[in-house]
Each structure stands twice: as structure tokens, then as C-alpha cells.
Amino acid sequence: MAVSQANLPTFCSAFDAALPTGWTNTASVVTAPTHDECSGRAKTFNAVGIRLTINYNTSASHLKYSISRNNANNKTLLIEESADGVTWSTVFTHTTANTPVPAAIHTRALNPLSRFVRFNMTARAGGRMEVDMVNVYNGSPDPAGDCPLLNLNCLNAKAICNDGSFTA
């Protein structure tokens, strides 16, 4: 059976909507508040075994994404890549210690032979990690992924946001 693959660049920042071609969720489809000023909600990793996998059709040079966590409980989220979707190697390991609050944007180099990237929660004592603004590309990222991160104050009551608006 043939599996649909994403064309590059491929981007998603709305994990509460249908995922793009070539993207799959396993386990939870729970979402968290968005990290960006575009739309949609962030992908939540709140249990061991939750994965987000992107299968793409040509060589990719980079993965760009935003990540955050909600508390200090120990948790581990692996960023992995694979040429065949069976054998995986770790690109980066996010732990509670190296994952920021609020969200921050990261860019990781990918092996040009890889055709899969996945986010894989492998350990969790409590809480969650959140991923948003996921962009897989070769050379230049998808311009749709150029969303500024939300001003953290916009998420708090009675704050002035980046655009000058006021939240009550």
C-alpha cells in the first residue's frame, strides 16, 4: 500500500485541524494553546508513546519548530529522522532541563537521505511538551511558517499584546 508523502517545504501550525498530506499523529490528538500569531493550536505530548511523524518525498536540509513545556516534571521528547520509517536516529533530545518556557524556535539539520522526521515522547513524569510551527524544508522554509511567536504577556490576564491590543 502506498503512503502519501509531503512535498517540501511542508509546514503545520494548526494541530487542531486536519494534518497536511504525509503527516500522522499517534495516540493523543490533544492540543495546547498556539505558540504563534498565525492560527491553530500546538501539538501536545502528554504521554509516553505520543508521536508526530512527517513523511516527505525528497531530500530535506532542515527542521524548524517551536517547543515549550508547562512545568518542571521530568520528560523527554526525541526529534528523530529515518530513511525508511523503520530505523530511527536521534537528531536532538529535548528534556525538561533544555526546553524553554515560554516557547522558543529551534532549527535542526537533517540527513539528506532521510525521508521521515518524528517527534517522539519517550519519558514523562508529569506535565506536557508542546510543539508548534513545524517546518521541514530543503534550502528555504515554507514562508507560511514565518509567524512570530506570541508575546507571553498576551497569554496572561490583563496584558498588552505585541499589536498593542489589551487582553482582560
Image (cartoon, helix red, strand yellow):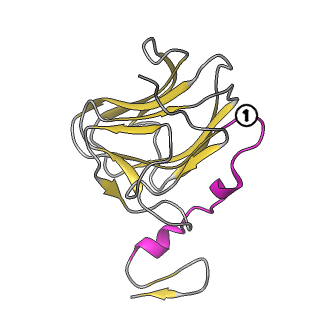
> Which range of residues does the magenta coloring cover?
137-156
Work out whether residue 49 or residue 107 is closer to the camera in this orientation and state it: 49
- Residue depicted at 65% across the width and 57% down the height: 144
Residue at 28% over, 52% down: 30
| 54 sits to left or right of 25 | right
Residue 28, image x and y in percent?
Answer: 26, 44
Q: Residue at x 54, y 62 (%)?
A: 36
Q: Is residue 134 above or below residue 156?
A: above
User: Which residue, given by chain and number where applicable, does mark 1 sit on?
Assistant: 138
Q: Position of residue 23 (x, y in %)?
A: 46, 39
Check the picture and name the quadrant holding the C terminus: bottom left
Q: Is residue 27 left or right of residue 12?
A: left
143 within the magenta span: yes
In percent of width and height, residue 21 lies at 50, 42
Q: Main secondary structure of the magenta part?
A: loop
Q: Name the one closer to the observer, 75 or 19.
A: 19
Q: Is residue 157 above or below residue 125?
A: below
